[in-house]
Image: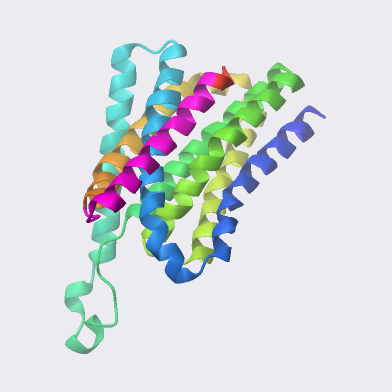
Amino acid sequence: MLWIYALTAVVIVSLVSFVGLFTLSLREGALRRTVFVLVGLAAGTLFGDAFIHLIPEAVEAGLSEAAVGAAIMAGILLFFMLEKFFFWHHSHGAHEESAETIGAHDHAPKPLGALVLVADFVHNMLDGIIIGASFLVSIEVGIATTIAVIIHEIPQEIADFGLLIHSGWSRGRALLWNFFSAVSAFIGLVIVFLVGAKVESFVPIAAAVTAGAFIYIAGSDLVPELQKTPGWKKTLIQLAAIIIGFTLLLLIAVFGE
């Protein structure tokens, strides 16, 4: 029964990735025109998740300040190299095309979508580990943890969906791949099932690495995109979106304790 409860919890958390379905009611043009707001929301939620949830979680678990700092830097460097890899992979072979074929392909580097999915994959796997380990403590603790994860995931998944759209993905493809990344929570649950609660000792260092990944994506990809938006009106809207995204994560941390 314990694992049935845990499995049900992970299924519910994974289905949160479909929160982007509400955008299917929007026309494609309207969605493209408002996606700049979602980019601002994403920047706020990524920074908030890193600074309010993941880094404090690593510190509270007993990791030294040096270890947390090194893990954050490792996450930044890892995703720096991943972005380089996606850039090189996307550009490979472009010089070999003819004048007739090169116009039919978009060779603008768009690694942001892939970076978001990789970071979200790791993040959701950590959620699966945390949920599984919490159910090993008690069913009550497991349910409380699941509720906290769901509340935390809703703004995160909306932001991730917006980033995939911003990267040029269709709504259907963005929803599908966002769900695939969410399924990694099952991997985390299976790890707990096979290894037991001991695996939770690896969560703090992984949380700090994920925080570094979120800081890198928000700082190197999202903030420069936000700077390209012209006009004070849109700039103020983006600023409000960043504050809202960050505040949501702050409120979850304050009232979830």
The answer to whether residue 104 is seen in the rendering is yes
**Percent coordinates x, y for residue 241 in the rendering:** 39, 43
Q: Which residue is drawn at 42% across and 18% down?
A: 56
Q: Residue at x 25, y 55 (%)?
A: 229
User: Total marks drawn?
Assistant: 0
The answer to whether residue 81 is seen in the rendering is no
From which residue to which does the magenta span run?
A: 228-254
Q: In this view, does 167 lie above or below 196?
A: below
Name the outermost residue toward the bottom: 100
The colour scheme is rainbow
**Percent coordinates x, y for residue 22 in the rendering:** 58, 57
Identify the main secondary structure in magenta.
helix
For residue 86: magenta? no
Instruction: Please tell me which residue lies in front, 220 or 130.
Output: 220
For residue 237: magenta? yes
Judged left or right of residue 216, residue 52 is right
Q: Is residue 65 above or below residue 164?
A: above
**Percent coordinates x, y for residue 129 in the rendering:** 58, 30
Q: Residue at x 50, y 64 (%)?
A: 171
Image quarter of the N terminus: top right
**Percent coordinates x, y for residue 165 in the rendering:** 42, 60
Q: Quadrant of residue 111?
A: bottom left
Judged left or right of residue 4, residue 144 is left
Q: Residue at x 23, y 65 (%)?
A: 91
Image quarter of the C terminus: top right
Judged left or right of residue 257, residue 233 is left
Name the outermost residue toward the right: 1
